[in-house]
Structure formats: C-alpha cells, structure tokens
Amino acid sequence: MNRTPLIAGNWKMNGLSDALGFFSALAGAGASTRHCDILVCPPATLLSVAAMRAAEHGYLVGGQDCHTEASGANTGDLSAEMLRDAGAAFVIVGHSERRADHGESDALVRAKALAARRGGLVPIICVGESLEDREAGKADAVVGAQIAGSVPESLSATDYVLAYEPVWAIGTGRTASTDDIATMHAFIRASRPDGDAVRILYGGSVKPGIAEQILSLDDVDGALVGGASLDPSSFAAIAKASHS
Ligand code: PEP
C-alpha cells in the first residue's frame, strides 16, 4: 500500500509573529514536498498568516486541538470550522498533553475527531502509553483501548491519521527503540479496518539523528515532531529523512 509520508510539526504554545519566517527558512533548508506531506501546527494566533506563507512552498498547516461544536457559547475554544476557515487542513486531537492537562477522555477525543471531519479537517488522533503502563507490560492493552475509544468507526482509513506517541518519550529526549516502535505500529495497523491504508505516525523526541532509522520502518508513515519542529533546519532534516 502506497502511503505518502506525513511529517508534522507541533509547535505547542510557542511562536510569536516573528516565527513566521519559518516557512521560507524550511524551504531554504531543502524540505521538499515531492515525496512527503509537510505540515506545521502553529498556535492558533499564527494560523491564518502561517497558512499563506506555508502555501507558497506547498506546505500545510493545522490546528493543535478543536472543540466538538461548530459554534456557540464556549469561551476561549475554537471549532474545526474556524480552523479550516483560517487555512488549516489537519487538526491534532487527543495529544497526551491535552489528555493529561485537560482531562480529555477517549470519548471526547472521538467526538473531536468527528467534529474535525464535519469541519473539513483531517484529525491526527494521538495515542500512547505511560512509562508505568509500558513497564507493567500493558502498552498494547492501553493503546488498543485508546484506539477503540478514540477513533470513530465511521471514518474511512484516509479520513484520519493516527499518531503513536509514548507519553514517556514526549519532550524527554528518550525515544522508543526501533523494535518497540515497529511492534506497536504493526499492532495498531492490525487493529484497524483497512489498516493498510491508514497513515500511522511516530512521535516522541524525534530528532534529525534518529529520524531516518525510525522513518524507514515499514509501518511508520511519518512523524509527529514537537521540539525539533521549531527549528527549520532540524525539521527539514527530518522531512528529508522520510525519503532517504
Ligand atoms: C509532541 O509534542 O507530539 C512531541 C512528540 O514532542 P517532542 O518531539 O518534543 O517529543
């Protein structure tokens, strides 16, 4: 199955307007969309200008979260429709920081994924076990349950993207071993109807030095990158590693 790699950056709560030179710097560093899709999820404050700058180079932009409703009395929230209107093509849902810091449940993540589709966006649905779960031998069970609860059955394989992000690898400089990543990605693929067509990203301290090893694994269809996506040359190096 031919799955175009997706290299996605999550800027989290980082970036003021002076960060918008990122897209030309990324192009200057040689990040080409010939063999992969390149996506940046900046803070929502930058989204509409980022969308225009990104489009000049064929890059995509996305949101980092969305509300389940299209509009309404939800102070401080953003709907999928609003993100789309600002130029987003994707939205991250169920990131472990939102699951932990905002108490987001699988059911809420599932509702957000459906809202993303309603609003015309592709949800990147994040799952991943804690270190405690992994050490207790429960990684498959935890990730399997998150997928069962967070991925709407009505979505077809190309309507969404999955991101496997072991919580203990995010922002810690620790990556999962390539064996563990390969095993988990194969498990995730086998757990989905039409699993062959679903893009499954790995996330968790992906850096240029290790990107090639991870991205060359059969069931890894790209990366969700936090820290290293803030630096255009690092992010470009990761994008290049997806087709080296
Ligand atoms: C993330 O936030 O999804 C992430 C993977 O972060 P980092 O690359 O910094 O570990």
Image (cartoon, rainbow, N blue to C red):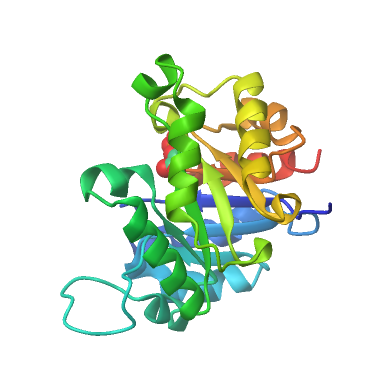
Query: Can residue 176 be seen at all in this image of the molecule?
Result: yes
The furthest residue to the top? 135
Q: Is residue 139 above or below residue 80?
A: above
Q: Residue at x 45, y 58 (%)?
A: 92
Identify the residue at image location x=43%, y=44%. 146
Drawn side of residue 16 relative to residue 230, left or right: left
The residue drawn where x is 45% and y is 74% is 49
- Residue 111 percent coordinates (x, y): 38, 66
- Dividing the image into four equal quarters, which quarter contains ligand 1? top left
Left or right, 76 with reference to 166: left
Q: What is the quadrant of the C terminus in the image?
A: top right
| Residue found 66% across the figure and 61% down from its top | 157
Residue 233 position in % (x across, y down)? 59, 42
Percent x, y of residue 202: 58, 39
- Pick whichever, 208 or 215, lies toward us: 215
The answer to whether residue 226 is seen in the rendering is no
| Count of numbered marks | 0
Does 186 sit left or right of 73 as displayed? right
The image quadrant that residue 23 belongs to is bottom right
Residue 240: give x, y in percent of width and height: 73, 43
Left or right: 237, with 85 as reference point = right
Q: Quadrant of residue 73?
A: bottom left
